[in-house]
Amino acid sequence: MTVTASRQLNAVAPTADRIDAQGSEFPTTYTTSFSAMGTTVHVLIVGGEPEQLDQSKLLVSQLESKWSRFQPESEISKLNRANGNPCVVSQPTFELVAKAIAAWSASGGAFDPTIETSLRTAGYDRPFKELETMSVHGSDLSAGQPAELKASPTPDGIWLDRTARLVQLPPGTTLDLGGIAKGATADIVAEKLLATGAQGCCVNIGGDIRALGKPPRQTGWTVKLDVPGCELPAIALNAGAVCTSTTRVRSWTNRNGAVEHHIRDPRSGRATTSDLESVVVLAERAIQAEVLTKMILVGGSARASEIFESSRTTGFTVSNKGDVIAMDGIQQFIVGCQ
């Protein structure tokens, strides 16, 4: 499937390419919504059994219990408290940490899973619903002034032993896998649903969406893009991922009265100050799209086209002034333009 004469969009098929070998009859769909990972999760399956919805909810809960920095007994929390000692982790956690390190390397440091200290220092030291209700933010503000924000330590010194599933963080290095964990979870749950009998499925974890298999209608998987402050067209695809990141949600006012948000610039530890406030990426997998949104928000519009082009993806950017830029190749996914 060609996006332009010179490049191909990785494994995301627009609905114009769809051939339905089973005719126009589509099986029953089942849906559920629930809260997890600090957001709302939506799961839709085509065919299969309704019990798979409960199984997907359990799987999300299991992964959250491994990856949340807000759950004291999670594997990520134990790694962050290990003070330089190696820890044995589960296979899913080992793989996610390894992928996060690889994404940091591939992004030139624009994506960095070691921003946990920056987030905590800025006040994001508890689940966001609790943070919204607090008048004083951050556990390090006992002296009356926020602690100094510093550049992320980077994953450069993290040691991995795949055979023993050992992860060792250098002293002072802590992980936040919030965004990449959501993307990975969407991928894992969607793939599990197809492997256990669903004909198709769509998993949406707070804007990180993965669609696989048979869609619920001939027009494919239709995604309404929820981007604060602007109205983007709906898109339709047969399979792939759509992820949205924005600086306009998960924001708060720190003790000094400055507005903070969860998208951090690893080079300074501060909230990003690029000219972009929202990014939408269509890619093969949600984990890839999630990382790319963070890279583009940090790099700003000056790097957006380059990142989309080199990753063979497409999407939208929205500037701080509300200007929407549609990337090359997105037109064939816009509903009504196929």
Image: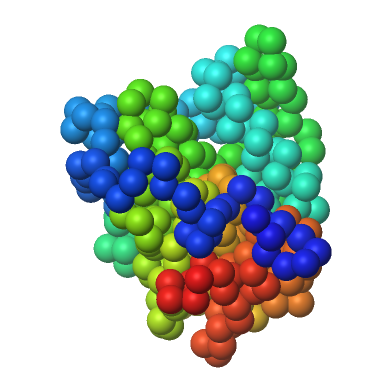
Q: Quadrant of the N terminus?
A: bottom right
Give the x, y percent position of residue 164: 66, 10
Residue 167 location in percent, x, y?
A: 65, 22
Q: Residue 175 placed where, x, y %?
A: 59, 40
Above-or-below relation of 196 to 31: above
Depth check: give the residue in front, 132 or 15.
15
Q: Work out whether residue 138 can be spotted.
A: no
Q: Is residue 124 above or below residue 301?
A: above
Q: Residue at x 58, y 33 (%)?
A: 96
In this picture the colour scheme is rainbow
Count of number-bearing discs: 0
Quadrant of res 280: bottom right
Q: Quadrant of residue 254?
A: bottom left
Relative placement, left or right, of 250 versus 118 is left
In the image, residue 197 lies at what x, y percent? 33, 26
Q: Is 64 on the left or on the right of 143, as rendered?
A: left
Residue at left offset 29%, top offset 41% = 46
Res. 201 image quadrant: top left
Answer whether residue 24 is visible to the viewer in this image: yes
Q: Residue furthest top?
A: 164
Q: Is residue 272 left or right of residue 215?
A: right
* Residue at the image position 72 percent from the left and 22 percent from the top: 160
- Name the residue: 42% across, 42% down: 21
Residue 37's place in the image compared with 146, above or below, is above
